[in-house]
Image (cartoon, rainbow, N blue to C red):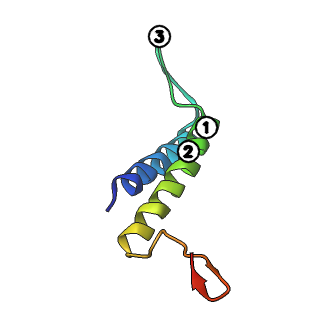
Amino acid sequence: MTTAQERLDNVRAEIDEVLRKGQRLRKGDREVQRAELASLRMLEEQYAKQAGREAAAKDGRPRITRLYHGGKGI
């Protein structure tokens, strides 16, 4: 598993925690606030793109596009 994929999985797990248990937890006089859901969604999008790029690079697909003009390589 790639680094970006691991981060993506962690962010998705945290999003699930926020959705199931809520943004803030309070026990007695203590309170814990989790990361903002909007921030987690932005990280999810960013890591998904990175994981896609890493997967594409791993597959060996070329990242260079060759342009031809009039049948000859430029």
Badge 2: few (under 14), some or many (20 or more) residues near its Cα, within 10 Å? few
Q: Nearer the viewer, mark 1 or mark 2?
A: 1
- Residue ID at (34%, 59%): 2
- Residue ID at (56%, 40%): 40
**Disc 1 marks which residue?**
37
Which residue occupies the extreme right position in the image? 70
Residue 67 location, x and y as percent? 60, 76
Kind of residue at badge 2: Arg
Quadrant of the rendered image containing residue 37 = top right
Tell me the element at label 3.
Answer: loop
Which residue occupies the extreme bottom position in the image? 71
Residue 20 location, x and y as percent? 55, 45
Tell me the element at label 1.
Answer: helix
Q: Nearer the viewer, mark 1 or mark 3?
A: 1
**Disc 3 marks which residue?**
29
Side (left or right) of 21 relative to 51: right
Tell me the element at label 2.
Answer: helix
Q: CA distance from mark 1 to mark 3?
A: 24 Å
**Disc 2 marks which residue?**
20
Residue nearer the viewer, 53 or 27: 53
